Each structure stands twice: as structure tokens, then as C-alpha cells.
Amino acid sequence: MFDPFKGIGLPEPNAKADIILCSHGHPDHNNTKPVSHEKSIVMEAFIGTRQIDEVSIKGVATFHDDSEGSKRGRNSAYVVHFEDVSFFDSLLD
């Protein structure tokens, strides 16, 4: 699961995730409690590469604003590869 949210005008996520990727530490992007279980792996603002079972995760450093992070800080974007599918998740606003 990417960036489990809270307080954005939508109901909180109602699912449990094995891997939870949070782009940064703001509460509207790291609401991990409702989606975690006892074996969940939570990665917040992760930079680097990690293999979790068959899932390959690469965290790439970005900024959370257009002023090199001076307004809202740093951020992580994620490239995830699982089986024959790769996808990219980022919050660049």
C-alpha cells in the first residue's frame, strides 16, 4: 500500500497490507495504523533498494515542493517490481 491517508475528505483505507510505503512523514501520507498487521513492513521516506520476498522496491529521493524541499521537505518516490509488472508511485506537488 502506498501513502495510507487520513484527513483528506475520504474514508480511511480499510485493508491490511504486508508492505506499506509512505512517501514522507506528514499525517495525510503515513496513516499506517489502520492498514498494518503484526507482520507488516512499513517503510517511510525510504531511499535505496530492498527486496521483500518477490517484491523489489527502489526508493528515490525527491522534494515535496518545487523549491527543493524548502517549503514542505523531502519526499520519496517508489519504483516497485513484482512478477512481470513494474510501476512508479510519486507525490510531486
Image (cartoon, rainbow, N blue to C red):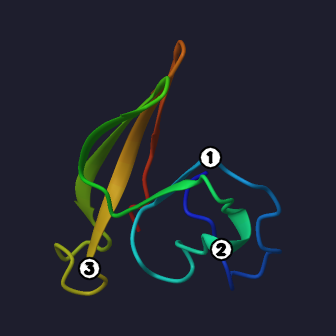
Pick the residue in front: 21 or 33. 33
Name which of mark 2 and mark 1 comes first in the sequence. Answer: 1
Cα–Cα span, label 3 and label 2:
23 Å
Q: Residue at x 65, y 59 (%)?
A: 38
Q: Relative to 83, is 58 above or below? A: below
Q: Position of residue 1 (x, y in %)?
A: 61, 51
Amino acid type, callout 2: Lys
Which residue in the protein does label 1 denote? 18
Res 46 → quadrant: bottom left
Q: Residue at x 66, y 62 (%)?
A: 36
Q: Residue at x 41, y 68 (%)?
A: 93
Which residue, as the protein is rendered here, is positioned at the far top? 84
Q: Are marks 1 and 3 in contact (CB under 8 Å)?
A: no
Name which of mark 3 and mark 2 comes first in the sequence. Answer: 2
Q: Position of residue 29 (x, y in %)?
A: 53, 72
Residue depth check, mark 1 versus mark 3: number of the one nearer the observer: 1
Amino acid type, callout 3: Gly
Which residue in the protein does label 3 denote? 73
Q: Which numbered dot is residue 26?
A: none
Name which of mark 1 and mark 3 comes first in the sequence. Answer: 1
Amino acid type, callout 1: Asp
Residue depth check, mark 3 versus mark 2: number of the one nearer the observer: 2
Cα–Cα span, label 1 and label 3:
27 Å
Q: Secondary structure at mark 1?
A: loop
Which residue in the protein does label 2 denote? 33
Q: Residue at x 62, y 65 (%)?
A: 4
- How would you rate the neighbour count of disc 2 (Cα within 10 Å): few for under 14, some for 14-19, many for 20 or more? few
Q: Secondary structure at mark 3?
A: loop
Res 72 → quadrant: bottom left
